[in-house]
Image (cartoon, grey):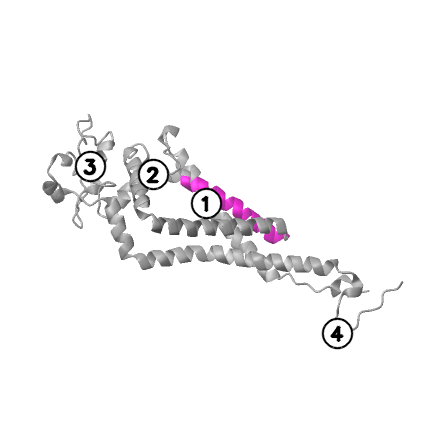
Amino acid sequence: MYSQEDTKHVVSKCLKYLLFTFNLFYWIVGSVMFGIGIWAVTQKSTFTQLASVATDPAAILIAVGILIIIISFFGTVGALREYICFLQFYKWTMVVIVILEILAGLLAFAFWPEVEASLETQLKKGIKNYRENIDLQNIIDKVQTEFQCCGGGSSNDWDINRYFKCGGPSPEECGVPHTCCRMKEGQQINIQCGWQVRKQVRTEQKKTIYVTSCISALKIWFKDHMFIVGAVAIALAFPQFLGIILTHIFVGQIQEQIEECSKPPMYKYRPDRQPLAVDS
């Protein structure tokens, strides 16, 4: 009868610790995202400043961070302890996520007008809470500056914000944020440049602010950078596919090891010698 050392070991230590490190990295990433989200929430003076989960960056960071932490926990512990149930949960959860991502991409392509309308709706919600939520304010300012646009569908979208609403009590009434203004390189920022600009006719507005809607500007950008967008999508999807494949191989090795160890000694095979007879 052979000793335990005679058993053929099929579980790759290299694969085991590669999978462990892979998931540990994402666990750290998820924890950082969760921490940043919590920090952003604590920076808001009141909880009434929180927008809906769909539009509040802090809430999105917290939700995504928790999801990554949970999934990577099963992958990390499953790889380290060789728990098949943990690894199977991790693998199939990743498969479901990848399928949902692919479906989301296909549906977004097939129903782009609806997606565009939804983006405009979400952007308008952000505009409405522009002064109430500093995170949304920073994002909208960044979008308007980088894409040289103003408002979701048009600059008139700013009328739904109580500070920029025409006829309102604010000195900014009937205006737009300064990030809508046309700026020359090196020119000092004038935060009052957009005040009451919407009282002017459109031809006059063009001299002071960008009149292109941000939705239109985003569409143009995506069309001009389709290759880059595709490359980024593939780069983000590759680690997910890699995790699924590595986990599948590792689970197979563990199952093979279990089967090998469960065989009676008389059936174990050594290529360098004949198996010994088992005493009756």
- Tell me the element at label 3: helix
Residue where numbered disc 2 is placed: 135
Residue 155 position by quadrant = top left
Q: Nearer the viewer, mark 1 or mark 4?
A: 4
Q: Is residue 137 visible?
A: no
Residue for point 48% across, 54% down:
240
**Three-letter amino acid code at disc 3?**
Asn
Residue type indicated by callout 1: Val
Give the Cα distance between marks 1 and 3: 38 Å
Q: Tell me residue 123's x, y (percent).
A: 30, 39
Find residue 199 and report its horizontal and vertical position in percent: 12, 34
Task: Give the residue pinned by disc 1.
Answer: 32
Q: Earlier in the sequence, mark 2 or mark 1?
A: 1
The residue segment tinted magenta is: 60-81
Residue indicated by mark 3: 156
Q: Residue at x 63, y 53 (%)?
A: 82
Is residue 161 rendered magenta in the image? Answer: no
Q: Earlier in the sequence, mark 3 or mark 2?
A: 2
Residue at the disc numbered 4: 272
